[in-house]
Image (cartoon, helix red, strand yellow):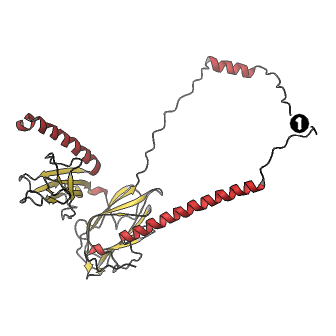
Amino acid sequence: MDTLWGNPTSTVIFIIVSIITTIVTNVAGDVLTACYDGSNKTIDIHCGSGSMVRIIKTFYGFSAHGSCAFTENDCTLKEPQSYDCVGLSSCHVPLKGVEEGGVMLPGCHKRSNYFQVEYECVPKATMHDICSTTQLKAQTGHIITPNYPLPYHRQLNCNLTIVVAPSQKLRLNIVTMQLTAQGKTDCADWLYFNDKFHSLTLCGIRSNTWYDMHSNFLHIELKSANFTRSQGFWLYYEADPPLPTTPPSPPAVEESTEKTPRESSILLTTLMPQPTPTPIPIYRDEDDKPRAAKSLPFAAIAGGVIGSLSLVLIVLLMLLLIKWLKERRYFKDEKFLEIRNPAFRSSGDFNEPNNTYYN
């Protein structure tokens, strides 16, 4: 401790890292880091018996300042690995490359000098069992299979619907999923999604995968055809963009019964008899007929209406074209499937890019 505070440079770095760590914690959850100085081999997360560990992000980083936590402009490498301890009350995340002095980062050709984990402790009481809940309307939520993280090992046919505000769209995160496969092209248990525009059928193993829905509606269905020992899944959803917060109404101001001098003057003037107003003269033409307002030609009116309708039609066609292009790109990128058959799946389920089935 004397060495740390006795060095001004180390003191400044320590304060900056503490501030940045606090900011990251407020944004992405709790943060734990480990330095590649030979003293750490794992990062240990403890949430307590009433909560489950959800790992949001893990990555390796190199700090030119020797910091043991992420700072702006650091060279980083995301860790895509899934962890078996997700869903448990505690988790031990191992550090790779300890013997080599760090993991090689392709972005800067440096070895990492720290490893960072961003995680969340989610209370079990906030979880929604897909077989016990039929509809969710909250802005965010967690959905699990019966007995998660223990296997459900029984036949299931459960449905759940999520609906948020019409101005929002849903985002779905598969925190972890383990559904039994059957061969290389079929699923014994499967998970089905439908957002009224596209549908997707999944099985196998996935972790920390995000999907953007097309609407504020999402139907989720779990089908278990056999008595298996699958762990099941943990899903997290959120509505985007967040709903605006309504500012509090200003306090009501009580009207005073006492009249100000100006109000008394106005009231007195109102009660006094008013002189008869002088009629405004109406000017007439020589033939003693009132002047008529000049009307626009019919052709000008018709042209204006047709022009306005044409502009509206062009705008609508452009919006439809943009929507079609976005849906076409989304369909191509995500390989959403318009069928419930569990034999149809996306290529990432079993890491076999050549065996992709979709209509």
Q: Residue at x 89, y 36 (%)?
A: 284
Say if 26 sits above or below 213 in the image: above
Say if 224 sits above or below 76 in the image: below
Q: Residue at x 77, y 55 (%)?
A: 298
- Based on the displayed image, in which of its 4 quarters is residue 270 positioned? top right
Q: Quadrant of the C terminus?
A: bottom left
Q: Quadrant of the N terminus?
A: top left
Q: Residue at x 76, y 19 (%)?
A: 272
- For this orientation, the residue located farthest to the top is 261
Q: What amino acid is found at the position of numbered circle 1 in the picture?
A: Arg
- Based on the displayed image, in which of its 4 quarters is residue 160 positioned? bottom left
Q: Is residue 194 something that shows in the picture? A: no
Residue 83 percent coordinates (x, y): 19, 63
Front-most of residues 256 and 233: 233
Q: Secondary structure at mark 1?
A: loop
Residue 262 percent coordinates (x, y): 64, 19
Q: Is residue 3 something that shows in the picture? A: yes
Q: How many marks?
A: 1
Question: Going by the image, does 97 lie left or right of 182?
Answer: left
Q: Residue at x 16, y 37 (%)?
A: 12
How many residues crowd around disc 1 within 10 Å: few (fewer than 14), some, or many (20 or more)? few
Residue 264 percent coordinates (x, y): 66, 19
Front-most of residues 193 and 327: 327
- Based on the displayed image, in which of its 4 quarters is residue 11 positioned? top left
Front-most of residues 317 and 238: 317
Question: Going by the image, does 57 lie left or right of 223?
Answer: left
Q: Which residue is mark 1?
A: 284
